[in-house]
Image: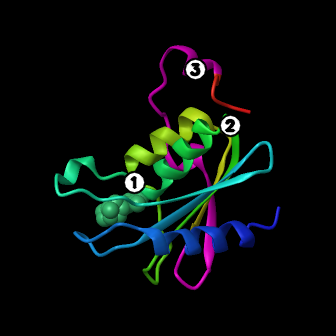
Amino acid sequence: MDVKPLIEKALQARHNAYAPYSGLRVGACVRAASGRTYSGCNVENAAFGETCCAERVAIYTAVAAGERGFTHLAVASDRDEAAFPCGACRQVIMEFAPHAQVVCADCTGAYEIHAIKDLLPRAFAFGPMKEGCGDA
Ligand code: THU
C-alpha cells in the first residue's frame, strides 16, 4: 500500500493540534480495514494528565464511527525526526490493530514503518482482547 497519502493526512491534521503547553503539534491518521481513514491531533489541557495524543484521538474517532480493525496508522509532528507513538498509544493500537503497520514520519514526510508487535513486544493482553476482538 502507498502510505504517502496517509502521511499527508497526518501532517495536515497536526495543524489542528491544541498544544499551547508543549508547543508540539502532532497529527495521526489511521486506515481502517474498510479503507476509510480517520485523522486526529493532540489535544492538551491545563491539567496536563488530561491531554490526549493524536494517535488515540484518531483511533477513538474511528471507533466512534463504527470501525474496529485497522491496517495502518501514520503519525507525524512538527519535528525533523520520525514521530513514534508513546507507550499508552502503543497499547491502544494493539487493542484494535495487533497486525497494524505504524508509519512514523517526520515533518518532511520521510518515514519508517514498524509492525506494532515490534514496537510493543510482549504486550499486556486481557480477556476478549486476547482473541483480537478489536481486530479486523
Ligand atoms: N503526543 C502525541 O500526540 N503523541 C505521542 O505519541 C506522544 C506525545 C503529544 C502529547 C502532548 O500534547 C505533546 O505531544 C507533548 O508530549
Give the residue at x 30% y 53%: 51
Q: Earlier in the sequence, mark 3 or mark 1?
A: 1
Q: Mark 3 highlights which residue? A: 130
Cα separation, mark 3 vs mark 2, equals 19 Å
Give the residue at x 54% y 68%: 13
Residue lying at the far left of the rendered structure: 47
Cα separation, mark 2 vs mark 1, equals 22 Å
Neighbour class for label 2 at 10 Å: few (<14), some, many (≥20)?
many
Instruction: Measuring from the top left, give residue 9's x and y in whole percent.
Output: 64, 69
- The image quadrant of residue 124 is top left
- Magenta stretch bounds: 105-131
Residue lying at the far top of the rendered structure: 127
Q: Along the line of sight, which residue is nearer the eye, 117 or 59? A: 59
**Nearest-to-viewer mark from 3 and 2:** 2
Q: Mark 1 highlights which residue? A: 86
Q: Amino acid at mark 3?
A: Lys
Q: Earlier in the sequence, mark 3 or mark 2?
A: 2
Instruction: Measuring from the top left, give residue 68's x and y in whole percent.
Output: 67, 34
Q: Along the line of sight, which residue is nearer the eye, 86 or 60? A: 60
Q: Where in the image, quadrant-wise, is ligand 1 located?
A: bottom left
Q: Please indicate whether residue 10 sits to the left or right of residue 44 in the image.
A: right
Give the residue at x 46% y 58%: 54
Neighbour class for label 3 at 10 Å: few (<14), some, many (≥20)?
few
Q: Secondary structure at mark 2?
A: loop
Which quadrant would the N terminus be assigned to in this image?
A: bottom right
Q: Which mark is residue 72?
A: none
Cα separation, mark 3 vs mark 1, equals 22 Å
**Nearest-to-viewer mark from 2 and 1:** 2
Q: Mark 2 highlights which residue? A: 67
Q: Please indicate whether residue 79 sits to the left or right of residue 101 in the image.
A: left
Is 111 contained in the magenta span?
yes
Q: Is mark 1 within 8 Å of ligand 1?
A: yes
